[in-house]
Image (spheres, coloured by chain):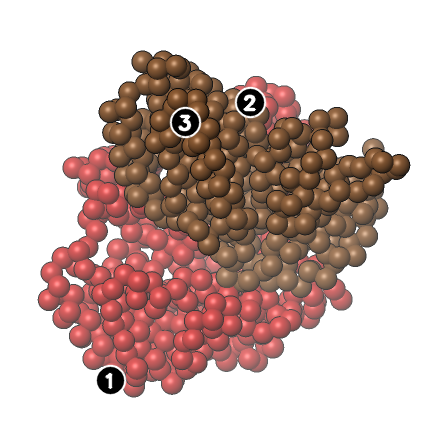
Chain colours: A brown, B red
Amino acid sequence: MPAKTVIFKRSKKWEGELDKCIRCGYCYELCPLFKSYNWESDTPRGKMLLIYGMITGKIKPTQEIVDKIFECFYCKNCVDNCSAKVPITDILTDARADLINAGFEVQGTIIQIDEDLCSICGVCVSLCKYDALKIVDIGKDKKKIEVDKIECRGCGLCMAACPSEAISQKEGCNVTLPELHERVKEILRQEDKKLLVFVCNWSVFPDMQLSENETFIKTPHGIIVSMCSGRVAPELVLDAFEEGAWGVMVTGCPPEECDHNGNYKARRRLILLKNVLKGLNIDPNRLKLGWFSTGESAKLQQSIDEFAKELEKMGPIETYAKK
Amino acid sequence: MKKIDAEKLKKIVGPENVSNNLSDLYVYSGDASIHQSMPQIIVRPKTIEQVQKILRYANKNKIPVVPRGAGSGTSGHAVPIDGGIVLDMKRMNHIIEIVPEDMLVRVEPGVVDDDLNRALKKYGMFYPPAPASSRIATIGGEVAANASGVRSVKYGATRDYVLGLKVVLADGSLVNLGSNTKVHSAGYQLERLIVGSEGTLGVVVEATIRIVPLPKFRCLGIANFNDLKDAGNAISEIVASGSQPSLLELMDGIGIVAVNKALDLGLLEVAAIVLFEADGNVKEAVDFEIYKMKGICEKHNGFNIETSYDVKERQRIFSGRKKLFASLSKYKEGIVCTDLADDMGVPNSKIAVTAAKIHEIAKRNNVIMAVYGHCGSGVIHTKIMLDPKKKSQWKDAEKVIEELYDYVHAVGGVTSAEHGIGLSKAPPWKKARKDILPMMRAIKKALDPNNILNPHKLMDAPDNWLKATDLRYRVGN
């Protein structure tokens, strides 16, 4: 495929800022993408290097480079960590706009809507904090939901809310909905796993480390890093009970601390879900919600242990008996 | 450049751990230095056997291999100047065992320094070298650079903690160097030969390192000075007085302005700050050290002196220093912080004069240089701040570097105290240490006859740092 000509209209202005980046790499300490894939090209520093290379003409954009540029959840841990105060995510957004305008295929963490499945109910539109979704007319009495690929931050809240399961994400650090369903099954089919904990990437996960170390968060229970508590779709919880879980815990950032308000959505969703559980004859106390800030891994650990003790008293759910 | 059989490497480590995509090659072409040169392929091993197989293949085919940790080096150690394979060691990141009763820990090379210290905290122990980059720096990289940091004044450098190393040599053979004991006398100290070898002699695949108990008390102080010379002299006197600081740092006015701008710290904008710390298990002993150091600062006109035992307060006082390096780019519009002339070491009595000399040389050559560092151990950090777009500024930098290192060597100092030689510091270092180069080359030849391990670094690096590789910046005319 011949190389595409890209005019870096929006991102060119950042060359000076990118010169200020001293490439110390401190930005990738808390990068969830780097933790998931471990390639330096997944780090904020890597992305900034690629953008610098492209706008200065040192390298020509290729599809692989574009794919890397479109992988980011905009958690902004990198921006907060940068002492040279390089506006990393602003630069990324501008580079994305230039690459989209040049006609590149973009996927990465940008959400995609399967039009065959979408009922155009608009739940996702009202939910998106970044105004990245809108209903557009595409002919007489025909509508569809359009994704603004520059504005989409890949937070994934719409995926969890979509009643038709029409929204997906190509790259999601193993937290796309189908991957999460798989993980739930995989964990609960292990004999000793009775409690499943969804932890939020932004709050407690960054506190987990780059190095493997058994001494950290010692728990015999299943832990799934769900990126944001707002991504934990109700059917994941039901799935867990059906697979024989004695209890499910969903954890997220404390109120006011979630960037996408995903924690509020999780709370609302789980309160409703508790009512559903009653109807299914499942004790609603088997579903627990907890708030933990970055660095509160000890508190999380304690909370998991206490919940496990309560569950031991309750025993298995008769209907789905996993003894 | 030699052709590399990617399929062979994929068989060794799995296809998902090999890449020759431009997106990866370009990212792995640089580190925190000014240099840039692309590898031909990146390989990410997970086991010792995989490293052995990769090296056997590379040695047979005479393909360069450049081991890489976090890529946070400042002198271009990890920049693959001859192409070849970059060996990304970050997947070998397992803390194998912590043995508090033997005061040691065994780790794989990709373990991150801060992670290790977080794990050790539970046992009341710590691993002290603490380079500023400890949040991402890997133990393997620290061993390769003989890294050290703010605590070196009391606790020393990486070399003082390495008891034993497992190293894969150029021909793929595995050797077990050193011991599990604090002292060990059996001929050549080969583990020490590897420390600081910058990836030129072998690939570190496991390290046994000494750990020490965390002190019960730490007290940090800060003193302001209206004259950089006074601050330098205070530090020299503290060290010479027999005080035992666990940290003794200098930061000049340029550094203070930069961190205030970048981090909004509200530090007093004076000519210099001295940070001093003492630690220990007996509070009275710590109090005594702090009292003594405070007195010396006052004697040299230090003012607004604050001290604190409180963790949060200590973090606040220290935050500016921890992030100074990156903040320097914020000092003035149009100039950026380049990693040049960054870590010379001078004898204790020469701190004040060297600091003044640095400012003088910078001014005369149209660049800005901040002076800071772990001056208690004689480490003076600087950075050359310049307009990278202007060709003339790079000429200025060349003049600064020549003049500055001639001065440092003349007062009995060293080219690099803690970041290593790599590419950018090789010319002045080679000029100053001509006598040891043949010995180093003989060792290199004996251990790596095909010259595949991180070739053309240290004693074999090009004689002109500016032309050694492409620069990471776009330089105009």
**Disc 1: which residue:** B299
* Percent position of residue A55, x then y: 74, 54
Point out the frontmost of discs 3 and 1.
3
Q: Please give the residue where the numbered disc 2 appears in the rendered image.
A: B14
Residue at image position (41%, 67%) is: B320
Residue B396 lies, in percent from the top left, at: 62, 71
Q: Nearer the viewer, residue B146 or B119?
A: B119
Q: Quadrant of residue B184?
A: top left
Image position of B40 (left or right of B326): right
Amino acid on which disc 2 is placed: Gly
Q: Residues within 10 Å of mark 2 (few under 14, many from 20)?
A: some
Which dot, 2 or 1, sits closer to the camera? 2
Residue A127, image x, y percentages: 61, 44
Disc 2 secondary structure class: loop
Identify the residue shown where x is 28% and y is 20%.
A315
Residue B310 showing in the rendered view: yes
Residue at numbered disc 3: A278
Which image quarter: residue A316?
top left
